[in-house]
Image (cartoon, rainbow, N blue to C red):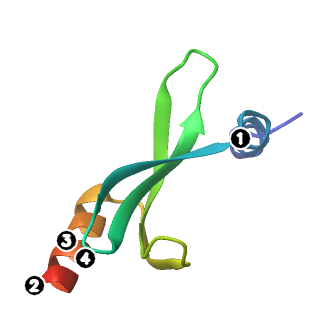
């Protein structure tokens, strides 16, 4: 009936994406986007570097890569 990938997409749309700020400072912030599962576990999907109130400067599936980008920006 449904493939695993299709079911995964359907579950994400039902559960909804959540965002939380992992780090904020010096006019930049690191945001973690993920899915809040029914059991209460937060499953990260993507990390974004933002200037607060602006669109994303950088997007990655890796928290380490996003943190490295911030270190490059801040010198």
Rendered residue at 15%/75% (across/down): 71
In 3D space, how far apart are the residues under numbered discs 2 and 4 (Cα atoms)? Answer: 10 Å
Rendered residue at 25%/76% (across/down): 69
Q: Residue 4's image quarter? A: top right
* Mark 3 or 2, nearer chain start: 3
From this view, report whether residue 4 is shown above or below residue 37. Answer: below
Q: Residue furthest top?
A: 39
In 3D space, how far apart are the residues under numbered discs 2 and 1 (Cα atoms)? Answer: 35 Å
Dots 3, 4 in contact, CB < 8 A: yes
Percent position of residue 40, x then y: 54, 19
Q: Secondary structure at mark 2?
A: loop
Residue on which the image places disc 3: 68
Residue on which the image places disc 1: 16
Q: Secondary structure at mark 3?
A: helix
In 3D space, how far apart are the residues under numbered discs 1 and 3 (Cα atoms)? Answer: 28 Å
Residue on which the image places disc 4: 69
* Mark 2 or 1, nearer chain start: 1
**Between 38 and 21, the one nearer to me in the picture:** 21
Dots 1, 3 in contact, CB < 8 A: no
């Amino acid at each position: 009936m449904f493939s695993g990938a299709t079911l995964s997409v359907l579950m994400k749309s039902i559960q909804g994406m959540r965002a939380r700020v992992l780090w904020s400072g010096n006019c930049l912030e690191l945001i973690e986007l993920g899915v809040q599962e029914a059991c209460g576990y937060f499953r990260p999907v993507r990390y974004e570097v933002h200037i607060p109130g602006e669109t994303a400067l950088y997007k990655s599936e890796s928290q380490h890569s996003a943190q490295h980008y911030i270190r490059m920006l801040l010198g």
